[in-house]
Amino acid sequence: MTRAMIPAARPLIGQEERDAVDRVLASGMVAQGPEVAAFEQEFSAQLAGGRECVAVNSGTSGQHLGLLAAGLKPGDEVIVPSFTFAATANAVAVCGAVPVFVDVDPDTFCIDPAAIEAAVTERTVGIQPVHLYGHPAPMDAIVDIAQRHGLWVAEDAAQAHGATWDGAQVGTFGTFGMFSLYPTKNMTSGEGGMVSCDGPEIARQMRLLRNQGMEKQYANEIAGFNNRMTDIHAAIGRVQLTKLPAWTARRQELAAHFDAHLEGVTTPVVREQATHVYHQYTIRIEGASAAERDAFATALREEHQVGCGVYYPTPVHRLPSYGLELDLPVTEMLAREVLSLPVHPSVSDEDRDRIVEAVNTVAKAGA
Ligand SMILES: *Cc1c(COP(=O)(O)O)cnc(C)c1O
């Protein structure tokens, strides 16, 4: 018997998205225009507590421009977790600034406030927490550290559309918050990013930087980029926004089922102050070596046709692009132990039951 592979991730693009793209193509105006403006306003109302939002062509561009708008200069230090996607640190490095890598909390996979405190120097200008897998970083503690040391906070909310901490949406705590709209994220525009800004001055800088430094055509005020979103992409994103609440609810429902039924593996912790939106549902094979975890993943895929992923197998500080030897024991341990199961909204009840049975079977065999 051959069973279909349950994919680790699957972007959902429906007829409504196609119709929206058609409408833009038929209009003949496809570059940044009214769809982008409408998308910014709708995203702001739904996901950013009404803060002004600026759309760009990727999450990474959003982070880069946000850091420039916040005033990041060459030689400045920004504290970042090493257990994340490389883009978090890259945005700092391409500004000529220094990402200072710190350790994370083994329960939530998010940056550890005590590690932030220990890493502050006279060159530190900001903290860039990541709401990893859709679980918010502990923003009350992070904002407190930032205020005491006169630092700004830049939230990497690439994976956390709609997550909350103490009742407030992520992306509303820092100087800016970046959301990715890449196809595998909780919602997509094809490629794209959205930046929620703390006030009109940051938003204005973002708008200048994304469009060659122009607010008025050919009146360039500063040197900027072309990091604009197109109306084609914005039209897709607007439709996806309307579907996101149901998708998030399905992710949470699947996660609750996994929490209750998985055996022999460590299931993800959710802090009392947090609403988790499960970009990933990430288990730990506690005490495993990387090879043992990889064998677990191979068994899920090859014996049970259950797709899964390791995010991320190499801590960012050890990637060739940084090549640092640092003592970050929790990050190293998680890089060996984590495994993410399919939790996207197209996982059916039947798929869900197959995933539970597969994980429990592989865990039992390895115990
Ligand atoms: C996806 C992602 C990014 C980058 O977003 P893009 O839209 O792919 O540029 C940054 N940080 C994290 C944690 C991500 O998952």
Image (cartoon, rainbow, N blue to C red):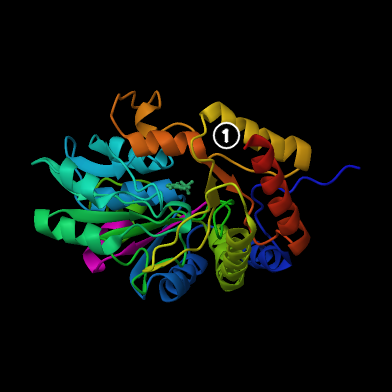
**Residue type, numbered disc 1:** Arg
- Ligand 1 within 8 Å of disc 1? The answer is no
Q: Nearer the viewer, residue 189 or 208?
A: 189
Residue sitting at x 46%, y 35%: 335
Q: What residue is shown with label 1?
A: 293
Please state the extent of the stretch shown in magenta in the rendering: 191-206
Location of the C terminus (image quadrant): top right
Q: Is residue 3 left or right of residue 268?
A: right
Q: Nearer the viewer, residue 12 or 267?
A: 267
Q: Nearer the viewer, residue 233 or 165?
A: 165
Residue sitting at x 38%, y 68%: 272
Please state the horizontal and vertical placement of residue 350, each as a whole percent of the image. 78, 60
Q: Residue furthest right?
A: 1
Which SS class for mark 1? helix
Q: Is residue 26 left or right of residue 96?
A: right
Residue 111 belongs to magenta span = no
Please state the horizontal and vertical placement of residue 302, each as a whole percent of the image. 75, 35
Residue 201 belongs to magenta span = yes
Residue sitting at x 33%, y 56%: 155
Other-residue count near label 1 (Cα within 10 Å), few / some / many at <14 / 14–19 / ≥20? many
Above or below for 306 versus 288: below
Q: Residue furthest left?
A: 122
Residue 163, quarter of the rendered image: bottom left
Please state the horizontal and vertical placement of residue 355, each as a whole percent of the image. 70, 51
One can see residue 29 in this view:
no
Q: Report the label total.
A: 1
Residue sitting at x 25%, y 48%: 68
Q: Residue furthest front?
A: 367
Please state the horizontal and vertical placement of residue 67, each as a whole percent of the image. 27, 49
One can see residue 31 in this view:
yes
Location of the N terminus (image quadrant): top right
